[in-house]
Image (spheres, rainbow, N blue to C red):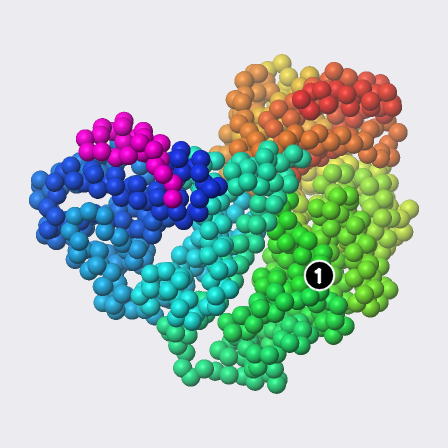
Amino acid sequence: MISQPASTELRSGMNINELKQAISSLDKLLEDNILHCSINETLTNRANFFDQLLSLLWQQHQFDVDTISLNAVGGYGRQTLHPFSDIDICIIHDAPLTQQDSAKVSAFLTQLWDLNLDLGHGVRSLQDTYQSCRDDVTIATSLLEIRHIAGKQGHAIKVLNALYSDELWRSDTFFEAKLTEQQQRHAKAQGTAYSIEPNLKTSPGGMRDLQTLTWVARKHFGVADMLTLRHKGFFTNDEYAELIECQNFLFRVRFALHQAAARPENRLLLQYQAEVAKLMGFGEGSSLGEGGNIAIEKMMRQIFRAMKRIRELNQLLMAYFAREIAPNTPSHVIPINDKFEIVDQHIHVRDEDVFIDRTQIMALFLLIATHHDQIIGISPETLRLLRQVRRRLMGDLQDFQVCRHTFKQIFNHPEGMGLAITLMHQHGILASYLPQWREVVGQMQFDLFHAYTVDEHTHKVLKNIYRYGTDIQNGTIDKDRQLAADIYDKMPNKSSLLFAALFHDLAKGRGGDHSELGAVDARLFAKFHELKLSQERLICWLVENHLLMSITSQRMDIHDPDVVNRFAKAVGSQTRLDALYCLTIADIQATNDDLWNNWKAALLKELYFSTRKALHNGFENVQQLRAIVRDHKQDALQILQADDADIDTVKALWKRLPLAFFSHAEANNIARYSKALIKHQLQPDYDSQFETLILIDNVTVKGCSDVFVYSKDRPGLFVKLFNALATLKISVKQAQISKTKDGYVVESFKVLDFDDMPIFSETRRKQVLQKLYRVLDHDAKLPKIRQPRTHKSFENQLSIEFLYSRQSTRTVLNVSALDTSEFMEQISTAFRKQELTIHSANISTVGERADNVFLLSNAQGQQLSHAERQQLTALLNQTVGD
């Protein structure tokens, strides 16, 4: 018990400032002693202090002790009061409040607000309280934890008696309401707490799952806590100890989170993780980056482990509660074999000794896949046995040859990646089978690109591949996944793709290239599981090259025949291309919910078809650039002739334009740009010296809006355009820059609006046009772009890489760094200092990092020499790295 100093003592007659000081002193005392006291003692001490404080203020107003009462509810009623938790109170009165009583209540509440307390309050008559409980299960739930503080004694007891009886809520309807509420909450979190910023309160396995158990138990069984429920035989002593251990750990993390955030925060945001790890005693920690990762990683693994165990125990107890509170009589039983049966859509063991034979663990999940249309889960008895045998495993399940055979059967089964793989993931069976999986359970990925832990991301990739098949069957496939689904549907050996997905990231966190290390693991797995040599080779190639297609499509110029040629050589066969395309889409979509868009879909699809054609024709027979330009021009001329354009004027214009204008645009866009340029020259409506033309219409190109700019060249033009779009919250996905022979610049930007969609609104397009003209032609000042709060948690690790270039006069540069508002300007400053010309830019933002590829030439229009590359690297390190 903490001995409280005089500064925390409450006395009658204290003013607001003195009370504030007492609150501050208590919080400082609790924070200083948090590592030396049990978390429950700390939270109870804080609740007791506020009991005294509220009682003291209540007594000052001399309320009638026979008609009105002050009560704690919610978390405050449970006496689990964290530093910035709401002080939830309920004022209950018998008769209608007199004007004098109303004034007293108002004055009392005003005092609490003056103390800067986060107050949740209700003022109701006893009958109104009953009615509010009937109308709103949330209010009924909060009042289940009502606790008397001051005033009339009987109100809290009456409310509890009414709630414990069937007067306000029947036990079965209350249980169904809380179960539905929990299911909706889990669905909102996409069924996982394994995200980079978990919500300690509402994520699956969070504190709300614990509270739901308590609420249901209180309502139906009339028990005060989990200890009493244990005595009723609903769970074992080990399960009770596990539940309390996990609860206390989450309480301590939340307490530290409130300290770090200095506000009522429940999401463990990136910006607080280092400080919370330090407060929890996991190590000093630092901002996310190389320094603080170890302490944060240790803490996060413990958090994810605790939340996983809470979710599992919640599932177990809620299933037992369902039988007790809302029994389904008679049970519907379907025998499967002599060891398993299906009871009310849950697979159930027929003998509690079944898992003495460890191979039956894997058999259980194969049966779930086989009877997928009859099973929705695992019975609580079976889950309890599974948990017990999981703890007693002496080695890995894959040590058993029968288990290896069954594991392959699950991955070969068309429904194996449905409910079966999800339950294997949720209940730790994949970790018990694969040591590589066990190593990445709860493994953080320290960037904003990956929204989930390694194991959860891998699970999502498997589910995405499984969806290719189910979406085709159900007719629910979306157009961006249609090609992948069609390819997958025709794949003769789907398990090769699934095994590659299983291993593609499992080597993360070991140091070294995870793709190469993963390929080694995959090869050992294939040999140990006696896969065919052709399967082994495909799986290992996919694991080692699983990033190849996304990197090529987003960093390289996929309209360049040489890029396609080299990619086709690296792939080598149609079988590999098909599998890699399917894996790439599933991987991107499982990485971050906001990452996938029409632009990425279009790039991947275009690269797929270009590569397929190259593979069919032979690598050296890819059409050369000038042939492509000739075809584009010919097709564009046909479009322009159909529109009655003056062909001589068109050809005169085209002589001035650079080759890249024709090689990187489709024929209809060339025709559209040409008409706009001719009209601009014949009927000038510009009011500046730069003769600027900006074209933004309702045409979308590969899922993006197209911004076309023609203007006289001058320093900083590209950066001005880029920054102007950024202030409008428009993201640039690709930029093509080329110069005419007479000193003009032609720039084409593929962009997405703030909602990651093309700019569909005419009003929005006009707004963008006006902004760009003001910035380009009238030098309008741009507001400073605020750096996202999440980015402040990351160190700026600059990466500079010179890539292969087939053009003797061009250098390809990849620059990757923290995505800040100054990033593009800093890069362009370095280019200007060295008098370099930007010919094209592939611009992509991946999580917190900007990853951009530039096609450059020096002042003489040639490739950068070795000395010039070294000079540029030093300049970039100086301007961007600092």
What residue lies at 76% left-to-right and 28% top-to-bottom?
839
Is residue 644 or residue 697 the one in the foreground? 697
- Where does the C terminus fall, quadrant-wise? top right
Is residue 636 or residue 7 the one in the foreground? 7
Residue 817 visible in image: yes
Q: Residue 324: image x %, image y %?
A: 39, 74
Mark 1 sits on what residue? 434
- Numbered disc 1: secondary structure: loop
- Where does the N terminus fall, quadrant-wise? top left
Q: Is residue 527 left or right of residue 346?
A: right
Task: Name the amino acid type tagged 1.
Answer: Leu
What residue lies at 75% left-to-right and 58% top-to-bottom?
500
Magenta-colored stretch includes residue 48: no
**Quadrant position of residue 10:** top left
Q: Residue 330: image x %, image y %?
A: 42, 84
What residue lies at 27% left-to-right and 27% top-to-bottom?
17
Is residue 251 or residue 10 the one in the foreground? 10
Is residue 74 or residue 232 the one in the foreground? 232
**Quadrant position of residue 752:** top right
Q: Is residue 74 left or right of residue 423?
A: left
Name the outermost residue toward the top.
689
Asked if 341 appears above or below 814 in the picture, the reply is below
Q: Is residue 671 left or right of residue 278?
A: right
Q: Which residues are magenta?
A: 1-26
What residue lies at 19% left-to-right and 60% top-to-bottom?
158
